[in-house]
């Protein structure tokens, strides 16, 4: 996948999404502060500060997260 698609999602009114990998795993990106995009790699942090490093070649799709039904 072209990482430009991820950069566009981050720049154009962010909505939480999943990065789907060739293994079938989905990595959540709940906020733009949780992701860094370089030339060929994406790093996604979770709420416990664990990093998932993803090579762009393994990204197969981006999928919107469904909105939570919780009230704030």
Image (spheres, grey):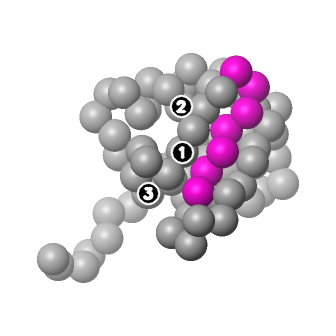
Instruction: Name the residue tied to disc 1.
Output: 35
Main SS, magenta residues: strand
CB under 8 Å between callouts 1 and 3? no
How far apart are the alpha carbons under marks 2 and 3? 13 Å
Residue 22 located left or right of residue 27: right
Quarter placement of the C terminus:
bottom left
Instruction: Tell me which numbered mark, 2 or 3, is placed earlier along the sequence.
Output: 2
Pick the quarter of the image with the N terminus: top right
Give the number of the mark in front: 1 or 2: 1
Range of the magenta residues? 39-45
Disc 1 and disc 2 in contact, CB within 8 angstroms: yes
**Residue 1 seen in this snapshot:** yes
Residue 60: x, y in percent?
72, 39
**Residue extending furthest left?**
72
- Between tags 1 and 3, which lies in front? 1
- Residue at 60%, 32% (x, y): give it: 37
Residue in front for this viewpoint, 54 or 20: 54
Residue hosting label 2: 6
Q: Residue at x 77, y 57 (%)?
A: 24
- State the CA–CA distance, disc 1 to disc 2: 10 Å
Q: Which residue is under mark 3?
A: 30
**Number of residues whose C-alpha sits closer than 10 Å to that of mark 2, classed few (under 14), some (14–19) or many (20 or more):** some
30, above or below 9, in the image? below
- Calculate the distance from the C-alpha at mark 1 to the C-alpha at mark 3: 9 Å
Task: Give 60 or 27, whichever is nearer the viewer.
Answer: 27
Earlier residue among tags 1 and 2 = 2
Question: Looking at the image, which residue is at 75% across and 26% down?
Answer: 40
- Give the image quarter of residue 45: bottom right
Number of numbered markers: 3
Q: Nearer the viewer, residue 22 or 12?
A: 12
Label 3: which secondary element: loop
Which element carries disc 1, helix, strand or loop?
Answer: strand
């Amino acid at each position: 996948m072209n990482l430009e698609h991820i950069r566009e999602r981050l720049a154009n009114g962010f909505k939480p999404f999943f990065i789907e990998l060739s293994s079938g795993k989905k990595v959540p990106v709940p906020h733009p502060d949780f992701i860094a995009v370089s030339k060929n790699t994406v790093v996604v942090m979770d709420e416990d500060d664990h990093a998932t490093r993803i090579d762009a070649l393994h990204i197969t799709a981006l999928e919107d997260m469904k909105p939570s039904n919780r009230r704030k």
